[in-house]
Image (cartoon, helix red, strand yellow):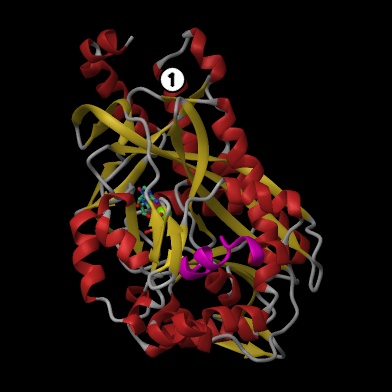
Amino acid sequence: MHEQLAEGAARLASEAREFAICHGILRYREGRIAHLPLTLLPCWLPRAFVEQGRQATLVFNRLYHAVATQRDFLEEQLGAALAGDEFLRRLHDCWPRTAPLKPILYLTRNDFMPAWNDGHCSARQVEANLIAASLGVMSERVTALVRHLYQGQSWLKDLLPNHSGTNLANAMGRVFQRYRQGDSQMLFIIPAGEANAFDQLGLLSRLRIEFEVPAVRTSLQELGQLGELRGGDLYFRGRRVTLVYFRAGYTPDHYPDPECWQARRLIEESSAISVPSVATQLVNSKKMQQILAQPEILRRFVEEEEARLLLEAQMVLAGVDQEIEWRGQRAPARQHALSHPEAWVLKPSREGGGNNYFGQELAHQLRQLSPASASSYILMETIQQRPFRGIRLSQDQVLDSPCLTEMGHYTACCLEPGSSEPVFNELLGTLLRSKDCTSQEAFVLGDHSYLDAPVLF
Ligand code: ADP
Ligand code: MG
């Protein structure tokens, strides 16, 4: 199969390129429109790996919601991280003491890697993305690309169906229609110079065409300048806002001036549904991921059986200066990681790719990280994968090398004001990103990994 494919790769590449242009698997790259990095051959994954991720994801949603509504717990647990990390602190400062009660919508993607141990594969969470979880539209199109390229192949019956983009837009559309007020609008908050504009446009255009949602794109800066509160409602350019969907705001670069922070405060203080709220974004910090991996803390928020499911799907996570038992030895996590840099990943409380430290860089950073700054960093055990042969197309080049992969499960979860029982908590589809096994990051827009699709066995 692989040999045959390598020979026909030039033909496949040309078909894939045309399909990508025809169906908009595109992004901006150095000021021009280019296709996204793509698979030319899907990735075979165990059914149980996908199923475990699906089950854990819906429980993780319940956990995140439970934690987001426990302000005292969140502030107490994140205290040191807030003191040590200016971005988290400024975010927290936008959270009003008396926040209005409003419906809640989560649009998330929970990312897992297949961890192989003695021939057995299980799902291990990399992280959850509760803000700006992207590529749902593109992922659906890549699944279609695989069907197009391999029409007639018997194994297509095992290709995981994927309607992540359609389902994401539908979830937004349903929520907007449920809570819209008169001629109110929906805002997409996007960063300046966004490369991933077409992925967002896929959602936005479906909302406009199929749901008649007045959806408009703006920036944090513009909302901070032009947004206002009237009787507790958010108005932008004279029109009430029902729903604000963030595709920006997860990194300090998205806040170049005080108006951007003003936008966050306005949304928080208003009746507008914010995807996500500041509280949710704080729950999504890497520091909180580590805190919530502790069994005694987890059990405060979910049932015993659910806690077991979540713990099974997690690697060892630790605060940098936390004493932990690892490989039979008790020591501060920093010490374990310094002795075995390849077995750990060092993560600051940041999103968006390119922030983590691996291997020798990890060791270097750990040596100079002061205890105060270390309070917002976490150490996570490396997930050990089994490389597979990946044939893919990146900027008109066919690449063929051993690869690793990461699967995200998209969800939508909606709750009425003050309720703890979701109106719905649903899986929407998947994202598969694969990368050369020598590459550490999985950032598709940065050409670190390519869009893939899973065939189940
Ligand atoms: P970000 O918020 O920047 O996306 P992630 O936690 O998702 O941060 O890490 C970025 C990438 O680093 C992941 O997509 C994955 O490729 C790699 N990575 C992160 N944690 C691990 C881990 N424990 N083991 C192996 N690779 C990891
Ligand atoms: Mg990630």
Position in image of residue 244 (x %, y %): 58, 69
What residue sits 68% from the left and 86% below the top?
A: 99
Work out whether 211 lies above or below 418: above
Around disc 1, counting alpha carbons within 10 Å, would you say few (fewer than 14), some (14 to 19), or many (20 or more)? Answer: few
The magenta stretch spans which residues?
Answer: 285-296
Q: Position of residue 406 (x, y in %)?
A: 42, 41
**Is 74 inside the magenta-drawn segment?**
no
Let me know if residue 311 appears in the view.
yes
Q: Quadrant of residue 23?
A: top left
Q: Residue at x 27, y 46 (%)?
A: 448
Q: In the displayed structure, does residue 250 sit left or right of residue 175?
A: left
Q: Quadrant of the N terminus?
A: top left
Q: Main secondary structure of the magenta part?
A: helix
Q: Nearer the viewer, residue 12 or 88?
A: 88
Does the magenta run of residues contain 295? yes
Question: Taking 373 as reference, is 43 above or below it?
Answer: above
| Amino acid type indicated by mark 1 | His
Q: Position of residue 104 (x, y in %)?
A: 70, 67
Say which residue appears at 37% left-offset and 79% top-offset.
Answer: 255
Q: Secondary structure at mark 1?
A: helix
Q: Nearer the viewer, residue 331 or 130?
A: 331
Q: Relative to residue 238, is residue 173 depicted above or below?
A: above
In front of the other: 447 or 113: 113
Up-down: is 121 above or below 206? Answer: above
Quadrant position of residue 142: top left
Q: Which residue is mark 1?
A: 148
Residue 57: horizontal and vertical position, in percent? 62, 48
Task: State whether residue 170 appears in this view.
Answer: no
**Lateral position of residue 401 relative to residue 71, left or right:** left
